[in-house]
Amino acid sequence: MLFKNRQQIIEHGQTPELQKIRADLLDILSAAVEAADPYIAVNVRVSESGIEIKDKKIDYSDFENIYLIGFGKASVGMAQAVCDTTNIANGVVVTNDSNNIVKNENVTTIVGGHPIPDQQSIDGTERIMGIVKRCGTNDLLIVLISGGGSALLCMPRIPLNDLQQTTDLLLKSGANINEINTIRKHLSFVKGGQLAASAPCKIVSLIISDIVGDPMEFIASGPTYPDSTTFGDAQDILKKYNLWNQLPVTVKNTIVDGVNAKIPETPKKGDPVFDNVHNIIVANNEIACKAAEARARDLGYDQTMLLTTALTGEARDIG
């Protein structure tokens, strides 16, 4: 039961009519949360034989080995759903939740720092890249991506202390998540499609979106998705928020080297490294809202209306 004090909440209604409304509201809220539950969202996609994607099925029997990597705040629940149905040869999950681990002897759970990455984030990412490098051309790599993955999947081009300082400046600057993750991509060896470029096998990424509109290139900084941004964009954002002169020297040098083509750009749309990559959104705010709407209609509220799933801005103003 999602609401442990459900009955108490209901009984606080002063009339039977109000009590029914309270019960209905709790049911509607539960439907929304359950629709975005990490375990449930992945579980409906996987089976003992394969993974359901948009218009076809990825059949496990086509592969020699199945490997799993995951990073983000929801990665443990997502990974458990896969492990409960799939024979995983080896896997690593990096989460910020110290109270949960993936219950599978072949999958290691590592706790990293969030929203500021730490050494554990780097150590976990090194373990993840060890799995990626182990993959052969006839293997399948399942990648589980969720919010928080930008901090938890961390293989920086600069010293950790400099990355931590830069991340802190960005989080306090007023930059939006797409802008912040543009910077993160270009200070990393794995973000912005670079993880996909490191894997020689077929990849299926199951993604829980925490960004309005589900831009897959920015969710957890898009490690398996083509990157539309550039080092020049990163430099422009840092100057836009008056951060350029506050940055560590290593950060400025990396961005400038990228602008001057001394560092390769992140892989873009059309790059053949993405030919064997499938990126699938398995949960987002729209799925949760539609589940709430459906439950409301089931309960007899036939004039239910979903106003928007794209409301953004300062909470006190928008509210």
Image (cartoon, grey):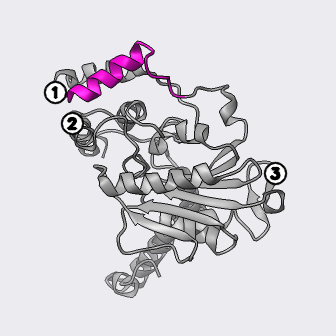
Q: Tell me, yes or no, whether the two marked residues, 2 and 1, touch with CB atoms within 8 Å.
A: yes
Is-magenta flag for residue 254?
yes
Which of the two labelled residues, at mark 2 and mark 3, occupies the earlier sequence position? Answer: 3
Is-magenta flag for residue 283?
no
Percent from the top left, x then y, of residue 185?
43, 34
Range of the magenta residues?
247-266
Q: Secondary structure at mark 3?
A: loop
- The three-letter amino acid code for the residue at tag 1 is Gln
Residue 217 appears in the figure: yes
Q: Where 60 falls versus 11 (above or below)?
A: above
Per the rendering, the mark at residue 246 is 1
Residue at 35%, 70% in the rendered image? 98
Along the line of sight, the residue nearer the viewer: 55 or 252: 252
Residue of label 2 = 169
Percent from the top left, x then y, of residue 115?
30, 51
Percent from the top left, x then y, of residue 84?
64, 75
Which of the two labelled residues, at mark 1 and mark 3, occupies the earlier sequence position? Answer: 3
Residue of label 3 = 56
